[in-house]
Amino acid sequence: MSTRPADATVPADTDTDTDTAPVARTVAAARAALGRGVGKVTGRALGPYQSAVIRIGFAGTWLLFLLRELPHRRELYGPDGPWSFELAERLIASNNAFTVLLWGRSGLWFELVYLMAVVSAALLALGWRTRATSVFFMIGVLSLQNRSVFMGDGGDNVIHLMALYLVLTRCAQVWSLDARRAAREAAEGRRGRDVAGPVLWAVLGVVLVVTAQKGATSGTLTVLFAALWAGHALWWFAERTDPRGEARALFDVIGNVVHNAAMFVIMAEVCLIYATAGWYKIQGSRWQDGTALYYPLNLDYFAPWPALSDLLGGSAVLVLLLSYGTVAVQVAFPFTLFNRRVKNVLLAVMMLEHAGIAVVLGLPFFSLAMIAADAVFLPTAFLVWTGARAGSAFRRLRPRTPAPRTPPAPAGTGPLEGLEPPPVSAAPAQGRG
């Protein structure tokens, strides 16, 4: 029997409050998660070690290629090549590609551009003035590759794309001379005089003006050049005039957003490369019957080690397994990104596969370019561990300078008189990020 009075009524909004409470908590949790996500994307440049690895990987690959082809540079991209200056002009007029090599016919101009490409690749790999050298690196890659479009082995296409993306990344947060200089300035509490930066950007400004005047490239790339030049000029001015002001903070937020978007595009590009390669292979009859690898192994052009090629090509079972395994790995890789352990295992398999292509088929620069692209998915813990081991090995190899000896105390003084406090050795500066 109920003890509640007959005229007692339940408040009308009790059930409503009970029903809407979980919805309100869900909305609040979603807002908090969204706020954390926005703060993470805008607050810092994600993947500092991954961006440093792809910077070093692609700049180093392009540098090694240019140095290897140094004796044949004029035949590949210069005035002595089969792809003549007139043919290059006709092609550029039809596709509006960018190359500074068509600004002059002289051999001296070609040598200067080739030298610029070599130097910019070396400086980008070292991480010196990375904001400017990444643009010079892009100019060198586009100029040489667009001059002779038929020179390449597939890896040049990857370097071509990544040269554009690297310009938009903050890829010198770690493992760079820029990070080392920034850490030293932070430890000393002062900012050094910047001379090289304005000089480099002044040269890039001249390139922008000449590009706009000649009109030999697409308007999109010209706008990109102008936006890069103006944005970095304003950023540099904000850093020098008000390093803790709102303008400086705004440019940092914009830089972080652009960097994170570029890193996402790089990861999507790698997945797209493997997905399209794998699905196109599935449609080929030679990949379906498992004999596709047999044919390049029996071509002299792809046989730097004939005995090794004959050994692999002579085993039908091995050819079948390698052919099917290549297709399976390439098709499955984009789907393994949702499982970290499977992704890491498959990533190691793909890197070993590219290393095998470099040795067996004689395509080292294609393999280096693809390994550098794969490195964007390497775990941060592994990269930090590798960097620490490499740093300790480098310090062991460096010659040690003996520490200065402390002079003895003057005669006739007390035990504390005449003694200077021992110098405090600062810890090695760590790169930002």
Image (tube, rainbow, N blue to C red):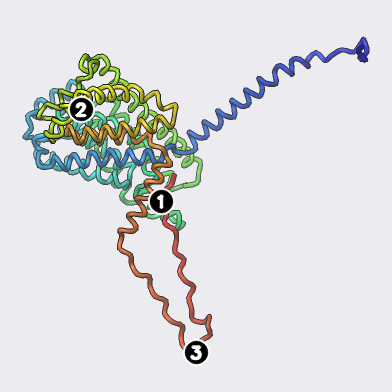
Identified at 20% across, 21% down, the residue is 292
Residue 73 is situated, as x and y percent measured from the top left of the image, at 11, 38
Give the secondary structure at mark 1.
Answer: helix
> Residue at label 3?
412
Give the secondary structure at mark 3.
Answer: loop
Q: CA distance from mark 2 to mark 3?
A: 82 Å
Q: Nearer the viewer's eye, disc 2 or disc 3?
A: 3
Q: Amino acid at mark 2?
A: Ala
Residue 173 is situated, as x and y percent measured from the top left of the image, at 40, 44
Identified at 22% across, 16% down, the residue is 289
Residue sitting nearer the eye, 86 or 281: 281
Q: Is residue 58 above or below residue 11?
A: below
Residue 314 is situated, as x and y percent measured from the top left of the image, at 15, 27
- Quadrant where the N terminus sits is top right
Q: Amino acid at mark 3?
A: Gly
What is the number of the mark on residue 182? 1
Residue 166 is situated, as x and y percent measured from the top left of the image, at 33, 35
Identified at 9% across, 42% down, the residue is 71
CA neighbours of label 2 inside 10 A, class few (<14), some (14 to 19), many (20+): many
Q: CA distance from mark 1 to mark 2?
A: 38 Å
> Residue at label 2?
216
Q: Upstream in the sequence, badge 2 or badge 3?
A: 2
Residue 214 sits in which quadrant? Answer: top left
Give the secondary structure at mark 2.
Answer: loop
